[in-house]
Amino acid sequence: MIIVNVKDGESLDKALKRFKKKFEKTGVLRELRARQAYEKKSVTRRTQIKKAIYKQSLNQDTV
C-alpha cells in the first residue's frame, strides 16, 4: 500500500504528483501489462538480448 502524507499548506496537486511517482516506481502497472498475455521464456529472453544489444550500441556511440 502506498502512503503519501499531505503536509500542512501543501497543495493536493503536489501530493498527487508524489503519489504518482511512488506508484510508478513500484512497477505495478508494468507487471500488470506483462501478465495480461503469456509470453514464452524464449521470447522474453530474445527481447532482453535485443535490449542489451541496443543499450550497448548507444554506449559505444557516446564513448
Image (cartoon, rainbow, N blue to C red):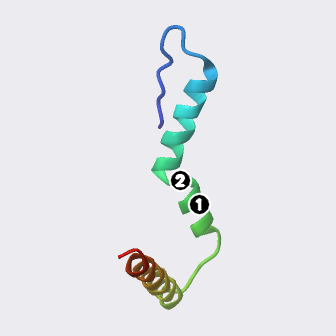
Please name the residue shown 64% across and 68% down the image: 36
Between 57 and 34, the one lying in front of the other is 57
Left or right side of 31 for 52? left
Frontmost residue, 5 versus 39: 5
| Above or below, 30 relative to 41 | above
Up-down: is 5 above or below 59? above
Q: Are marks 1 and 2 in contact (CB under 8 Å)?
A: yes
**Quarter-of-image position of residue 61:** bottom left
Residue 5: x %, y % from top left: 47, 21
Give coordinates of residue 41: x percent, y percent: 48, 86
- The residue shown at (64%, 74%) is 37
The kind of secondary structure element at disc 1 is: helix
Number of residues whose C-alpha sits closer than 10 Å to that of mark 2, classed few (under 14), some (14–19) or many (20 or more): few
| Amino acid of disc 1 | Leu
Q: Which residue is mark 1?
A: 32
Label 2 sits on what residue type? Val
Which of the 4 image quadrants contains residue 57?
A: bottom left
- Which is nearer the eye, 57 or 32? 57
Is label 2 in a helix, a strand or a loop?
A: helix
Q: Which residue is mark 2?
A: 28
**Residue 43 x %, y %:** 53, 88
